[in-house]
Amino acid sequence: MISIERSLDTPRWQRVALPFVSLILAAIISGLVLAASGHDPIATYRQIYAASFTSPGALTSTFVYATPLLFTGLCVAVAFRMRVWNIGGEGQLYMGAIGASGAGLLLGGLPQPLLIPVMIVAGVLAGALWAMIPGLLRAYLQTNEILVSLMLNYVAGLVMYFLIYDSQSFWRDLTSPTALVFPTGKTLSASATWPGVVIGSFTLPTGFLVGVGVAVLLFVLVRGTRFGFEMRVMGDSTSAATYAGMRTRRIILAVMALSGGIAGLGGASQIGDFGHVLDPRGLQQAQYGYTGIVVAALALYNPLAVIVVSILIGALTNAGFALQGPSFPAGLVGTMEGIILFSVLGGEMLGRYRIRIGSPLRVAPADAEADPGR
């Protein structure tokens, strides 16, 4: 008989080695897929590396794609770590973009060192408040936060479209002749533009630096604070947390607000670092919130690992756009991302569980033990 049992103790070397082995396996399987589709795997990997890191401007583009994935990955990681399934990072990022762009337009006359923190705070608050909706429903009405947060993504998208295409809102440009024909958002002032860190020909987005700081703070929060301990306990067993006297409702609300605030910060970064205008179509087509779920899963919900994985997925995304053409369809990049995801999750499952082959242990009935002569 074959059974699957949970491993009570996973060696440290195994926890370190499994992700690397999983990535090597993913590279081999992806190479087979590339070969089956008529592409030389070695040559394709070289092209992907060049398009992601070494070609002129490639490294900057990789970090442009990695920055929103860093925020949405952290958004998912902090919630999933406590078994709160926040699937609404996409909508929370939209609301963060709305809040940050609104603050940037309203206070565009402020100097840059003051305006950037204001935009960050506005984006965080907008994302956190949007995430509190499924958080409150989960904490007090026991509703399914997966469905509620997912549906709110579409609501947030419709709000963005309404502000730019279906109303004469504060966010919409109503002055330029082009905007009267093709609706568009107002462009933020120069003081609302977040300056990047220029290193030679490479420009590191300010938002990525902020995201790295957030990841470090989350790691310390989860590992070294009482709130992080309560999160870990609730992630293992909500009933145990309740029995221990923890205020589970408040913890759920705090985690959802924290998760949504991080996604909202990603929306603020999209406005300040890159777009400088509220662009509903561009944000929806990018689907950063849904890709962030993949990033968090690959990082095994470790905030520091999210940094590395976001760069990896950003590199693959950048390479996909650079190599996309008649001979290299965009679907191949998505296929490779899926192979990496399943390989890493499969390796994690092998680390947490073991396969037992053999007959199950049989326990003698109590009455047979009492009377051996029967």
Image: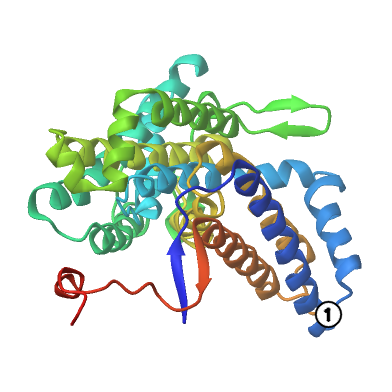
> Looking at the rendering, in which quadrant would you find the C terminus?
bottom left
Q: Residues within 10 Å of mark 1 (few under 14, many from 20)?
A: some
Q: Is residue 40 left or right of residue 20?
A: right
Nearer to the camera, 310 or 125: 310
The reply to whether residue 310 is in sight is: no
Residue 138: x and y in percent read 16, 52
- Name the foreground residue: 87 vs 25: 25
At 25% across and 35% down in the image, what residue appears? 254
Q: Is residue 99 above or below residue 368?
A: above
Decide if residue 69 is in sight here: yes
Q: Residue at position x 60%, y 47% from top?
A: 15
Residue identified by numbered label 1: 35
What kind of residue is marked 1?
Ala
Vertical relation: 331 (above or below) 226: below
Give the quarter of the image for residue 249.
Answer: top left
Where residue 251 sits in the image (x, y, percent)? 22, 36
- The image shows residue 192 at horizontal and vertical percentages of 50, 27
Asked if residue 154 lies left or right of residue 329, the reply is: left
Q: Quadrant of residue 4?
A: bottom left
